[in-house]
Image (spheres, rainbow, N blue to C red):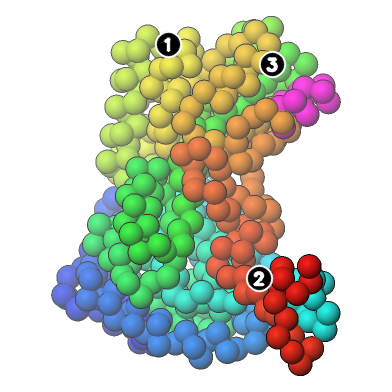
Amino acid sequence: MAKKYQNFINGQWVDARSGETFENRNPANWDEIVGIFPKSGKEDVDAAVAAARKAFDKWKAVPAPQRGEIMKRAGDLLVERKEEIARLMTREMGKILVETRGDVQEGIDTAYYAFGEGRRMFGRTVPSELPNKFNMTTRIPIGVAGIITPWNFPMAIPTWKIFPALTCGDTVVFKPASDTPATATVFVEILLEAGVMPEAINLVHGGGSTVGMAIVTHPDVNMISFTGSSAVGKVINAAAGKDLKRVSLELGGKNAQIVMDDANLELALEGVLWGAFGTTGQRCTATSRLILHEKVYDKFLDMLVERASKIKIGNGLDESVEMGPVINESQREIIHNYVKIGLEEGATLVLGGDVYEEGECAKGWFYQPTIFVDVKPNMRIAQEEIFGPVLSVLKVSDLDEAIKVLNGTKYGLSSSIYTQDVNAAFKAMRDIEAGITYINGPTIGAECHMPFGGVKETGNGHREGGWSAYDFFSEVKTIYVDYSGRLQRAQIDNR
């Protein structure tokens, strides 16, 4: 009998008001039902927002260091339950155990960072232009945060958003992806056990067009933090903008790794294998383009195809497996359609290009590691986000051309260059149009205490991670204290 889950609204675990439900299944074995979840609607969102709004005044009055201590306890609980959560995450979204353990660890790291930030809600003191007057700023919470998260990092990304929001004194209405609702439920359970005020965290399961947009457009939700596709991000930004809500968007990517002719090729090989096929290519930071200098093109390509052909595909609960399934049937169909597009455009397939259904994999949504060569920069497979294990290889003659090709998409999230030339490395750091650049590392590997996000259609200027998340979830308040005992007019009485 599949486990039945509920929403958490106004301090209670409850079913959707409609009574409707949906199934969450294992993408490695579609016969396995991970759980049954409430299919919520606007009425559930209204109740959750009302609870969060009511709790705001009380939660924001809790001293920030105390809120930080609660996040630290949440981190301790994540440590205790790390293996359990990792296994649940692998069952509901497919990636291998070493990666789901890393996903939980990122949540742990983010919790402990929040613990410290509770004592670092810094303002500034600055001199006044008038005598006997004191100027300062402080940071204050904003209100109700609507948090909408994707399925590929079911623990890490919610913690990136919710730990800072709660630490800043905001209350939360949380809609996780319908493909990974079980991990989200465990996270909320941990927050409650750690001591978060029950009404301050509300969990509403359901679809993006119903629950997600109801959160975005609700007049009592003050800000939205969304991670997902650029197309959906544009819709959210337009809808939230009508009410001048604060909106943070972390969107798509078409990330590239450059390999120069002086690169350590073995190191670059490990980087592209991890970047392109880790998480089955289902990361916004995944390496979907490989830009090779013509002098190493043939040699590196041979190394890459030989190694990628040996990647072991299967159920992520098997510790020997290197790549799990894609998230669902529709996503696998999208990936396969892009492979067809690549062939139609004239690219040459040198590895993969089809579904993988050997043995037990026939029960899930597996796809072969796929590599295209003879790819031109303007081809769709080199321009559009595929979100699967598909790598497009492009040849260039020098660093300037490599950077031009890398920059030649509408996205700008992550980037990478392998070179032993310090001058080339610094030129790449300066000229690459991306929010993140790695030198001699793959395009994936963000650390929780550093800002994360991109430029162009990858986002709207905000950053997640590190101190920047706390800037998003709080407001600067400017304060003047005049102890002169008389009216002092700035810009008038001092001139």
Q: Which residue is mark 3?
A: 399
The foreground one among 366 and 131 is 131
399 w.r.t. 443: above or below: above
| Residue at the image point whose x is 16% and y is 75% from the top | 18
The answer to if 420 sits in the magenta stretch is yes
* Image x and y of residue 78, in percent: 59, 71
How far, Cα to Cα, is label 3 from label 2?
40 Å
Task: Name the residue rendered at 49%, 46% in the picture.
Answer: 459
Q: Amino acid at mark 2?
A: Ala
Q: Which residue is mark 2?
A: 114
Q: Earlier in the sequence, mark 2 or mark 1?
A: 2
Residue 99 x/y as whole percent: 56, 50
Disc 1 on helix, strand or loop? strand
| Quadrant of the snapshot with the N terminus | bottom left
Q: Nearer the viewer, residue 187 or 351?
A: 187
Residue 224, image x and y in percent?
A: 43, 63
180 inside magenta stretch: no
What is the secondary structure assignment of the residue under circle 3?
helix
The span shown in magenta is 418-429
Q: Which residue is located at x 55 percent, y 68 percent?
A: 473
**Label 2: how many Cα within 10 Å (few below 14, some 14–19, many 20+):** many
Q: Nearer the viewer, mark 2 or mark 1?
A: 2
Q: Which residue is mark 1?
A: 348
Give the main secondary structure of the magenta stretch: helix
Residue 460 visible, this angle: yes
Q: Is the residue 473 above or below the residue 131 in the image?
A: above
